[in-house]
Amino acid sequence: MSRKNLRSLVPLFAVLSALGAGSAIIAATGVSPAEVYLRMIRSTFGSGYGFGQVLFRATTLLFAGLAVAVPFKVRLFNVGAEGQLLMGSFAAALCGMALPASVNPALGVPATLLAAMAAGSIWALAAAWLKVRYGVNEVISTIMLNFIAQGITGYLLTNRFAVPSTVHTPEMVYGSTLPGLDALLGLSWHSPANLSSLVAIALSASMALLLFGSRYGYTLAAAGLNPEASRHAGIDTDSRILGAMAIGGAIAGLGAGNLVLGYKHWFEAGLTSGAGFMGIAVALLAGSHPVWILLSALVFGWLDYGGLTVNTMVPKELFMIVQAAAILGIISFASIFRRGPG
Amino acid sequence: MGGVNAAARLSGISKSFGAFKANEEVSVTIERGSIHALVGENGAGKSTLSNILYGLLRPDSGSIEVDGRRVSFASPRQAIEAGIGMVHQHFMLIPTLTVAENIVLGSEQGGLFRPLPMRRIEKEIVELSRRHGMEVDPRAPLSTLSVGGQQRVEIIKLLYRKARILILDEPTAVLSPPETERLFETLRSLVAEGRSVLLITHKLDEVLAVSDTVSVMKRGRLAGTMPVASATKEKLAQMMVGRDVLLRTENPPQQPGREVLSIDRLDYVMPGGRRKLQGIGLTVRAGEVYGVAGVEGNGQTELLSLLWGTWDRRGNATGSIRLEGRELLGLHPAGIAALGVSMIPEDRLRSAVIPEFSIGENLLFGRHEEKAFHRGFGFDRERLTRETARLESEYDIRHGGAANQPLSSLSGGNQQKLVFAREMERPGLRLLVLAQPTRGVDIGAIEQIHRRIIEARRNGAAVLLISSQLEELIALATRIGCLFEGAIRHEFGEEEVRAGRIGGSGFEQEIGLHIT
């Protein structure tokens, strides 16, 4: 088997070794790992509700993963998906709240999603602009923008918009919400999974097209790999940095479609539960390829919800260890295989 | 040669970076108590050789002797212990510390928590600096010193560490003429007390003024070593830039047509205030090759960046660059390319290709805006595959395997042929700008590239050829302009160049005089 083929198996090795390490930890607490994993599989793939939960969590992660992957094509590390998702979610909740109650979903949903995308996009563009104009490293600026987003949304929620004695905004109008999968497909999963999951799948397919099949994607890759040569070839690298971050931020903002429009119908404290950060891991595991991100989001979504279902046997913290170990594994495996010729 | 008197002897040094041979079988002996100059163009291997002597690089083969003892340095620290010191082109000093602190830095004596005997150190520094005419105030913060003063600190630092062999990398590049003279006096006083100096430079006047022996490097090899007493500027210039006569491309005469490119009183001042171009003026007609001769660093890079619209806009450019009457100054690369201009930059890997991209993707690079390659919102893959196959066979681009392998797997010569194929095939090509088109390219590919340049000319394109290889210019050019310190100092007309082409090495020496 050639080195290249081996390299494409790195993510699989990483996940397996992480699960192996997880097993060892679980066994050390005196519980049988086989029993734990069996219960996880049964409660996720064995029930409509469980599967819907996995799908719902994977969907947010898919948006967040794509939000990292697109800027990465220009070699920008967007650590700010969390802040972009927060701003998008808050904007969506406010927009859905402000629309008249009688608004037609054909108008209300696009308007709300557009608000979310615009907010996420602006947040990402701030980092891109700082980079282009002043050469500020995007990792640092996006991290700081995450804190600022947390501050802004937290402040506005508690001091301005929260329904008294709750930590959430008023419910959105019906015309700005997305239908659940149950209603759409005539299922009775009673899960939070909604139309967003299908949108996310279509989005990752179109991002694959954008990055690998379009002229724009070609120039993004060129600008990322060799900015100097790209400028020579007449590619405006600054506009590619701005463009890729704007797209990434808009996608992160679209995550609001799943969390706010499809499920909660309001903005609340702790809404994102760090999904934006997890998106970095999702993109890393998939090597930033939009199609592999589909799979990697499912893996992380499964670990996320599966961990909850075995809460009585294994503490949730253990699954955080397994997730983090998987990421560490990918990074180290990848660098091991990158060494040597080729 | 000079058995006991050799301070350092490098024998058969070879060093490669990947496929690039930076040093090949280089042997140099630095006599004790002498100034040994090492000259050569950028990229000739001077810095690699000095970095090997200073322990920054390890040679692939060859041996080094210092004071008659065989040594092998794993790091500069070991070289320093053996009595070797180096002043880099970019100083390794800390602006916030004082002169004395900078000098002791790295060679502090005493315990971790014991204060340094600064008084004693300062006294020593004052003594050292007086003896060699390098007065400095040891207590002055480094940031208050001029560039020349900082250089003196670097030299005192080496003396403080008891260096007996001093390597100076382009020390005069940053100095004013009086400062340069002062430096030379210091160097003379250093060798008078038995130290040795290796002076790396490409300024021939300085070599003749200050050094005792000179070694010339060309393309990683030693072109020769001689006592300065028997060297002349012309001789050194030819050794530095001339090339062995290996091939002469057939260059049939041709009547040039209308004026395509006209550069008029072009000035460029860099953002830092350094003036790089001073009123360049030249014209290139359709069906002629205008050669620009010159030692690198005389404005070639800046001229190219202005021609191609990639110059640093924080700098100041005045004058005009017109393509058939249309002003190019102010346009960006995409706009300039669209007018039928192709450019082959001096540094291929950095600015002409994307090594990770495939051959086909690189053939598209810079021409990706052409409608003929488009289909939908992507590219016409079929057409691209056909075009790639056609260019591969027509331009003899050889690669070992599949068409989608990354460009980095191709040899330098084949990469350059690919760049040529792409730029020559640009639709409506009117002006072809070439910078060092055969650098790092093997002999076989050079011949092909030369033939292509003549072919472009015969097809009616105007060609601007910037090269530091005189042989190449003489073989290809219709007229030759000599670039020196940002201006065309002399221009050889058609008749002169044609006569020089037949004339032999005398013409090279004549050009050499105008560019140094």
Image (spheres, rainbow, N blue to C red):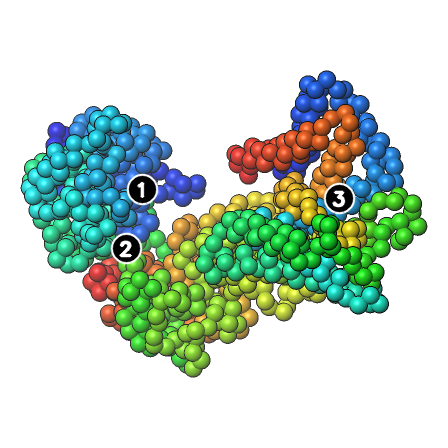
Badges 2 and 3: C-beta atoms under 8 Å apart? no
Mark 1 residue type: Thr
Q: Secondary structure at mark 2?
A: helix
Which badge, 2 or 1, comes first in the chain's sequence? 1
- Disc marking residue B48: 1
Q: Residue at x 21, y 52 (%)?
A: B144
Pointer 2 residue: B241
Q: Secondary structure at mark 1?
A: helix
Q: Chain of mark 3?
A: A
Figure quadrant of the C terminus of chain B? bottom left
- Front position in the image: B377 or A247: A247
Residue B102 in sight in this render: yes
Mark 3 residue type: Arg
Mark 2 residue type: Val
When asked about the image quadrant of residue A90, the answer is bottom right
Pointer 3 residue: A57
User: Residue B125: x, y in percent?
Assistant: 12, 39
Gap between marks 1 and 3 measured at Cα:
56 Å
When asked about the image quadrant of residue B198, the answer is top left
Q: Tag 1: Cα neighbours inside 10 Å, few (<14), some, or many (≥20)?
A: many
Figure quadrant of the N terminus of chain B? top left
User: Residue A331: x, y in percent?
Assistant: 59, 36
User: Residue B304: x, y in percent?
Assistant: 39, 65
Q: Residue at x 71, y 61 (%)?
A: A94
User: Residue B81: x, y in percent?
Assistant: 22, 29
Q: Are marks 1 and 3 on the same chain?
A: no
